[in-house]
């Protein structure tokens, strides 16, 4: 990434994706990016189903199946999400006990700088910042594979 930064390529993220360049991120940054993707592409109402151990069973009704067919999150695109939702998903998918430190929050700003995650709101001090994930499914699958995380199992469109 340092070579890409020095050559001025990081401002053009599609170039990184199209050339197949491997992006090396710190371990927790990979999980933060995965959490951002899940928060962007999964509806908030499904968080309990995917990230809580004993959430109870949910029956699939004919209405739910039709509604899911109408609006695939992958086709509609990423939706904005608050920072606290991303952090809740992050803490539930990381297997280690992670304490919220300045290092974790600085990695979020690094992901924004690299344009892997974009900030879409919260410029003033009253609103909480909102973000969107700016990477493709193939990119996030590659990142998830490097940390041994099965992202397809946690995506609403594939569940």
Image: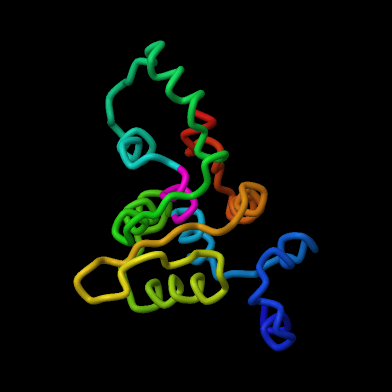
In-front residue for pair 120/28: 120
Q: Is residue 69 above or below residue 72?
A: above
Residue 38 image point, x, y percent:
46, 47
Where, by quadrant of the figure, is residue 1 drawn?
A: bottom right
Residue extending furthest top? 62
Residue extending furthest right? 19
In-front residue for pair 137/76: 76
Instruction: Report the predominant secondary structure element of the magenta stretch.
Output: helix
- 28 falls in the magenta region: no
Q: Is residue 10 above or below residue 71?
A: below
Residue 49 image point, x, y percent:
34, 33
Residue that appears at 40% across and 72% down: 104
Residue that appears at 41% across and 77% down: 106
Residue extent of the magenta highlight: 36-41
- 39 falls in the magenta region: yes
Q: Determine whether, in the image, residue 30 is placed left or right of residue 13.
A: left
In-front residue for pair 95/155: 155
Residue extending furthest bottom? 6
Residue that appears at 40% across and 57% down: 96
Residue extending furthest left? 126
Residue 3 image point, x, y percent:
73, 83
Residue 54 image point, x, y percent:
28, 31
Residue that appears at 62% across and 56% down: 143
In-front residue for pair 151/69: 69
């Amino acid at each position: 990434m340092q070579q890409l930064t020095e050559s001025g390529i990081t401002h053009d993220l599609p170039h990184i994706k199209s050339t197949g360049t491997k992006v090396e991120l710190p371990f927790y940054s990979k999980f933060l990016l995965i959490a951002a993707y899940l928060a962007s592409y999964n509806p908030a109402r499904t968080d309990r189903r995917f990230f809580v151990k004993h959430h109870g069973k949910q029956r699939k009704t004919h209405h739910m199946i039709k509604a899911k067919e109408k609006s695939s999150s992958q086709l509609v695109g990423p939706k904005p999400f608050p920072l606290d939702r991303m952090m809740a998903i992050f803490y539930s998918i990381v297997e280690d006990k992670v304490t919220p430190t300045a290092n974790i929050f600085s990695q979020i700003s690094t992901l924004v700088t690299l344009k892997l995650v974009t900030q879409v709101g919260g410029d003033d001090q009253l609103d909480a910042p909102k973000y969107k994930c700016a990477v493709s499914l193939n990119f996030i699958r590659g990142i998830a594979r490097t940390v041994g995380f099965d992202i397809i199992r946690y995506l609403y469109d594939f569940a």
